[in-house]
Image: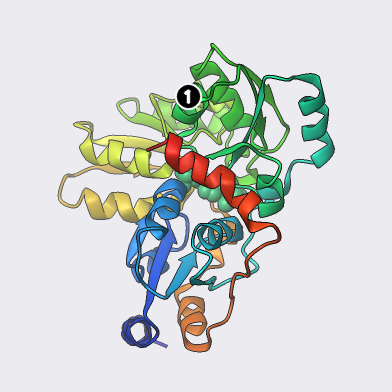
Amino acid sequence: MEMAEIARRIAELKREKDAVVLAHYYVPAETQALADYVGDSFYLARLAKTLESRTIVLCGVSFMAESVKLLNPGRTVLMPEPAADCPMAHMVQKADVDRVRERYDDLAVVAYVNTTAEIKRWADVCVTSSNAIKVVSELPQHNILFIPDMNLGRYVAEQVPQKNVILNRGYCPTHNRIAPAEVEALEAEHPEAEVLAHPECPQDVLWEADYIGSTKQIIEHIAASDKKEFIVLTVVGVAAEIERLTQGQGKTIHFPATRPVCPNMAMVTAQKLLECLERGTGQMELPEDPDRANAPLERMLELAA
Ligand code: 13P
Ligand code: SF4
């Protein structure tokens, strides 16, 4: 089906079904173009609570749809591709959390929002890459177990040195694969370029960065910058919004030669969005013990406000 026809059908179905479409910057540009709202993990989680529509369609990976469902238990939450899952969202064991809880009295377990509802139930508060520094620095506890992302955890530990941050061994396969050598090669080729990195990148890649932030922060930084050239160290999906916001400004962005793509986000195509709206498939069920899993999300919204 032609893209114009897909867009026409989607607009019709949204009206018929009282549905709103949210998309993360990492899904294909064609899907982002069909969404009512596009944003980073924090923006999407916070926004979902303010929407009136009966149905929320989340174009992203399952922890995002699950968070929206936890925050809006009364609404129908649909995922165009229910198999789209973030591997990092499973990279921590209960025993690792229990061991640290036994060792420290004055401890907060901080779960990156990229986690399953089960893991959120073990945590005291959630964070995203855009609010982790603020939330961790405002917690009353001195000891912080940061799960599951070791790269974001290490970055937060460096930025909040007054806390004792204990790390886990999880990582994002897509960001963790970005190598310092390819960044250095890009810098040699484009010496004037500003380097922007997502904190899920490894430490030696973050050392190369002039600016570190979430997807939304990276995009907004580029849109506001006086510079003309940028090296962007995150998933290539952010290019669509950067191009939209910087139209006519003569700005150029470069990605690592290996073109970081999140294979799970890439599965969320425009065709699947249409089928999901047509058939009402990919319903996210409320997970077990939803109040316990939602508590750390609500705490994040309070502390990051
Ligand atoms: P943000 O959208 O919060 O920057 O996170 C990136 C990411 O990897 C989401 O899975
Ligand atoms: Fe997970 Fe990485 Fe994909 Fe984000 S980019 S959804 S952290 S695998």
Q: Position of residue 281 (x, y in %)?
A: 57, 81
Quadrant (top left, top right, bottom left, bottom right) of the C terminus: top left
Q: In this view, does 160 lie above or below 202?
A: above
Residue at figure coordinates x 73%, y 20% from the top left? 105
Q: Is residue 240 above or below residue 109?
A: below
Quadrant (top left, top right, bottom left, bottom right) of the N terminus: bottom left
Q: Where is residue 296 in the image (x, y as percent from the top left)?
A: 57, 43
Q: Is 204 on the left-hand or right-hand side of 42?
A: right
Q: Position of residue 47 (x, y in %)?
A: 37, 55
Q: Is disc 1 surrounded by few (<14), some (14 to 19) or many (20+) residues within 10 Å?
A: few
* Extreme residue in the left direction: 248
Kindly identify the amino acid type of the residue bearing the numbered disc 1: Glu
Residue at figure coordinates x 34%, y 69% from the top left? 52
Q: In this view, does 55 lie above or below 188?
A: below
Q: Can residue 242 be seen in this view?
A: yes
Q: Is 286 on the left-hand or right-hand side of 16?
A: right
Residue at figure coordinates x 44%, y 32% from the top left? 186
What residue is shown with label 1? 138
* Extreme residue in the top direction: 162
* Count of picture labels: 1
Q: Nearer the viewer, residue 86 or 134?
A: 134
Q: Is residue 124 above or below residue 247?
A: above
Instruction: Tell me: is circle 1 under 8 Å from ligand 1.
Output: no
Could you say whether the residue bearing mark 1 is in a helix, strand or loop?
helix
Q: Nearer the viewer, residue 253 or 263?
A: 263
